Image (tube, coloured by chain):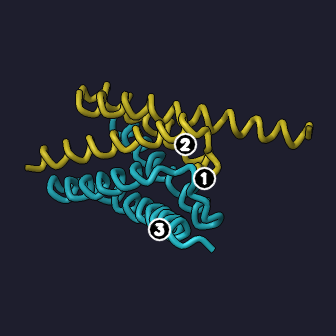
Chain colours: A yellow, B cyan
């Protein structure tokens, strides 16, 4: 029963980043997204992945491998937007 | 070593929602946030919390208790914005 709940939890939290990644790639709008959140979160998920490898837990490895890819995609678009916004402030046109 | 990495991972992923919650509460801008992400994510974290209680893991309970509060705050603002945007479409003024 606990294992089943853990599996449902892992599926939900991993799957939740799919609509966010689709939204960000489709609209390129990352105004409401916190850069610090995605920096901390992506790093944290990378740590979860290493933790999963170290304890040999396939569910932790798979869930965090998918999440790290999705979170990295969101972080990349956010970083691109942040950098182009900073360039626009330095060189207005 | 694995336990330490797991602890760092838990701190990073839990802490990551603090700047996002602050940004959303301060700006009220949730345009770039996916409603489906926060619906799935908050539900998933609630499942992780129940899972933590069932297996008696204090780190899982604490990390997910903090995250469920932060994610619920972000979800609430997103839901309020989504509903007021829908009302604006039905009754433009």
Label 3 chain ID: B
Say which element carries label 1: loop
Share a chain, discs 2 and 1?
yes
Label 2 chain ID: A
- Labelled disc at residue A76: none
In front: label 2 or label 1? 1
Say which element carries label 3: helix
Pointer 2 and pointer 1: residues touching (CB < 8 Å)? no
Q: CA distance from mark 2 to mark 1?
A: 12 Å
Please tell me which residue is depicted at 50% across the width and 41% down the height of the picture.
A23
Q: Which residue is mark 2?
A: A38
In front: label 1 or label 3? 3
Please tell me which residue is depicted at 47% across the width and 37% down the height of the picture.
A22
Residue count near mark 2 (Cα–Cα under 10 Å), binned few <14, some 14–19, many ≥20:
many
Q: Position of residue B36 (x, y in %)?
A: 39, 51
Label 1 chain ID: A
Q: Position of residue A13 (x, y in %)?
A: 33, 45
Q: Which residue is mark 1?
A: A32
């Amino acid at each position: 029963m606990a294992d089943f709940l853990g599996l449902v939890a892992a599926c939900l939290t991993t799957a939740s980043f799919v609509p966010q990644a689709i939204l960000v790639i489709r609209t390129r709008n990352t105004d409401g997204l916190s850069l610090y959140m995605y920096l901390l979160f992506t790093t944290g998920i990378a740590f979860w992945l290493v933790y999963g490898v170290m304890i040999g837990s396939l569910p932790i490895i798979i869930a965090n491998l998918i999440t790290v890819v999705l979170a990295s995609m969101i972080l990349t678009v956010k970083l691109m937007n942040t950098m182009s916004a900073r360039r626009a402030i330095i060189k207005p046109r």
